[in-house]
C-alpha cells in the first residue's frame, strides 16, 4: 500500500515540525518531527512504535514498545516542565514495576486472586499458591494457599532458616478458632500443626506418618495445655495409628511391640541373656566360681538371673549365688542359703541395676560349702536395657 505524504522540506508546501498527516485511506496518522514522518496514531487510537531502540525526537505522549530480548516493556514519552523521558507504563502501584529480565524491585508487590509460579510453568500455575520449580517437568497447580517446591530429578529441596547472635530460627505453625476476621480461642483436641511425610504409591501421593501438635485443654490466656503425638502407618494399611505421645502432664507414652521381636541393639527394652548348656563343676571348699557370663554394652541395665546348685555325697552346709562384675567373686549382696543337711539350692536373683559408661562383662557366681563329695551348678543371666 502506497501512502502519499506531503512534499518534503525542499518542495513547496513543506510540512512544519509537529504537523500531523492522516492518510485518507485509514492507514493511520504520522507526525513530522523536522526530519522524518513518525507514526502518530492508528485507526483504533494511539499507535505504538515497536523497536529494540527508542524512537528519536519523540513528542509528549508517544508510545514505544521495547522489543529487546528479555525486556518486552511498554513506555510512554513524558515531558514535564523540567525534564522529558521515556517512562514505563506497567506500574504496579507505589511507583514500582516488575522487570521481565534483570533489574531490582523495591517496596511491596501485591498479586491478587492468582498464584505465582517461578520456574518451569504448569497449567494452571499457582492457583493461589506459590510454586518454586527446578524440575524439567511442568508441575501441577499448588492449590490454594500452598507452598510447593520441586527439585530437579535426583536433587534435593532444602528449607534453610538462618539466624545469628542471640536470635533463633523457628519454624512455627499457628491455629485459631473462629475466623481470621474474628479469631477465637482453640478448644480441647485442636490440631496446632503437623509435619507429615508423603510418598507416591503408583496412583497418587499418600501420607506415610506425621508428627503432630494437639491441644489437651480449651485454651485461655493462662492455660496452653498441649502434647506432641506421633502417628505411623502399619504395613499393609493406609490408616495412621497413634504410636507415641509426649505430654508435660502424663509424661511419655509409647506403643509396645505386638510381635515377638527384640528391640535393636541400643534401643530401650533391648534384651540380652546367656544360659548354661551343661552343668558347671563347683568346688566344695567355699570358693566363688563363675557359672556363666554376659557381655553388656554401655547404658542403663537391669540384670537378674536364676541359678541351681546341687551336691552329691555329704550334705552341703552353705550355698550362695549372685551377679557380679568381678570374675569368681561373690557380690556384696547375694542370695544365700545356710542350712546344714541340704544337698541342693535353686532360686532367682533379685534385679540389679547398673549404669555403664563403657562395655563390661557381668558374671553369674556360685558358691558351695560341703564336707565331701562333688557339686555342680547351672543357671541363666539376663539383662534388659532400662532407658
Image (cartoon, rainbow, N blue to C red):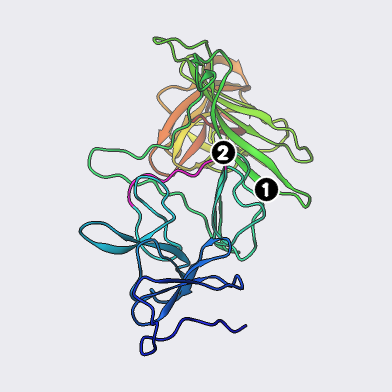
Image-based side of 353 in relation to 244, left or right: left
Label 2 Cα neighbours within 10 Å, binned few <14 / some 14-19 / many ≥20: few
Residue lying at the far front in this picture: please name it: 12
Q: Identify the residue at horizontal 59%, vertical 16% (top origin).
A: 189
173 up-or-down from 341: above or below = below
Q: Give the distance between the C-alpha atoms of the residues marked 2 and 1, in whole angstroms.
A: 21 Å
Where on the picture, by quarter, is residue 12? bottom left
Residue matched to label 1? 199
Mark 2 lies on a secondary structure that is: loop
User: Magenta stretch?
Assistant: 106-113
> Residue sitting at 61 percent across and 42 percent down?
197
384, 154: nearer the viewer = 154
Q: Is residue 143 left or right of residue 22?
A: right
Residue 152: x percent and y percent?
Answer: 57, 63
Q: Is the N terminus in the top left, top right, bottom left or bottom right quadrant?
A: bottom right
Up the image or down, 14 lies above or below 335; here it is: below
Q: Is residue 67 magenta?
A: no
What residue sits right under mark 2 in the picture? 145
User: In this orientation, which residue lies closer to the viewer: 182 or 371?
Assistant: 182
Question: Vertically, is 45 above or below 205?
Answer: below
Position of residue 217 measured from the top left corner of the image (x, y, whole percent) = 52, 11
Give the residue displayed 38% in from the left and 40% down from the top.
Answer: 357
Which x, y percent locates residue 209? 64, 37
Tell me which secondary structure the magenta stretch mostly adopts: loop
Q: 72 left or right of 307?
A: left
Residue 369 seen in the figure? yes
SS at mark 1 in the image: strand
Give the mark, 2 or 1, whose residue is nearer the N terminus. Answer: 2
- Pick the residue in front: 128 or 44: 44
Give the camera-side residue of 227 and 273. Answer: 227
Q: Which mark is residue 259?
A: none
Residue 112 forms part of the magenta stretch: yes
Amino acid at each position: 500500500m502506497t501512502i502519499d505524504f506531503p512534499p518534503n522540506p525542499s518542495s513547496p508546501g513543506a510540512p512544519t515540525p509537529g504537523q500531523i498527516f492522516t492518510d485518507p485511506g485509514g492507514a493511520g496518522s504520522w507526525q513530522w518531527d523536522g526530519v522524518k514522518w513518525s507514526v502518530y496514531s492508528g485507526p483504533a487510537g494511539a499507535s505504538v512504535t515497536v523497536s529494540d531502540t527508542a524512537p528519536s525526537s519523540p513528542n509528549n505522549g508517544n508510545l514505544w514498545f521495547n522489543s529487546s530480548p528479555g525486556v518486552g516493556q511498554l513506555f510512554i514519552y513524558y515531558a514535564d516542565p523540567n525534564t522529558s523521558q521515556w517512562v514505563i507504563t506497567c506500574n504496579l502501584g507505589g511507583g514500582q514495576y516488575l522487570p521481565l529480565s534483570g533489574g531490582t524491585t523495591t517496596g511491596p508487590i501485591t498479586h491478587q486472586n492468582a498464584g505465582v509460579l517461578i520456574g518451569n510453568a504448569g497449567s494452571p500455575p499457582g492457583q493461589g499458591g506459590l510454586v518454586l520449580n527446578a524440575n524439567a517437568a511442568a508441575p501441577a497447580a499448588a492449590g490454594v494457599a500452598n507452598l510447593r517446591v520441586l527439585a530437579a530429578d535426583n536433587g534435593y529441596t532444602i528449607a534453610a532458616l538462618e539466624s545469628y547472635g542471640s536470635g533463633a530460627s523457628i519454624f512455627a505453625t499457628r491455629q485459631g478458632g473462629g475466623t481470621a476476621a474474628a479469631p477465637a480461642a482453640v478448644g480441647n483436641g485442636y490440631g496446632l500443626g503437623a509435619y507429615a511425610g508423603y510418598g507416591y504409591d503408583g496412583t497418587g501421593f499418600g501420607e506415610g506418618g506425621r508428627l503432630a501438635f494437639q491441644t489437651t485443654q480449651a485454651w485461655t490466656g493462662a492455660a496452653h495445655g498441649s502434647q506432641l503425638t506421633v502417628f505411623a502407618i502399619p504395613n499393609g494399611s493406609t490408616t495412621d495409628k497413634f504410636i507415641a505421645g509426649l505430654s508435660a502432664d502424663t509424661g511419655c507414652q509409647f506403643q509396645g511391640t505386638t510381635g515377638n521381636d527384640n528391640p535393636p541393639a541400643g534401643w530401650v527394652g533391648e534384651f540380652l541373656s546367656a544360659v548354661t548348656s551343661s552343668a558347671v563343676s563347683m568346688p566344695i571348699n567355699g570358693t566363688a566360681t563363675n557359672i556363666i557370663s554376659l557381655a553388656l554394652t554401655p547404658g542403663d541395665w537391669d540384670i537378674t538371673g536364676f541359678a541351681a546348685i546341687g551336691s552329691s555325697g555329704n550334705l552341703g552346709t552353705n550355698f550362695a549365688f549372685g551377679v557380679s562384675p568381678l570374675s569368681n567373686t561373690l557380690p556384696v549382696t547375694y542370695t544365700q542359703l545356710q542350712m546344714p543337711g541340704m544337698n541342693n539350692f535353686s532360686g532367682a536373683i533379685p534385679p540389679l541395676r547398673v549404669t555403664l559408661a563403657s562395655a563390661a562383662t557381668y558374671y553369674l557366681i556360685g558358691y558351695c560349702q560341703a564336707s565331701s563329695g562333688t557339686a555342680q551348678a547351672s543357671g541363666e543371666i539376663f539383662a534388659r536395657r532400662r532407658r
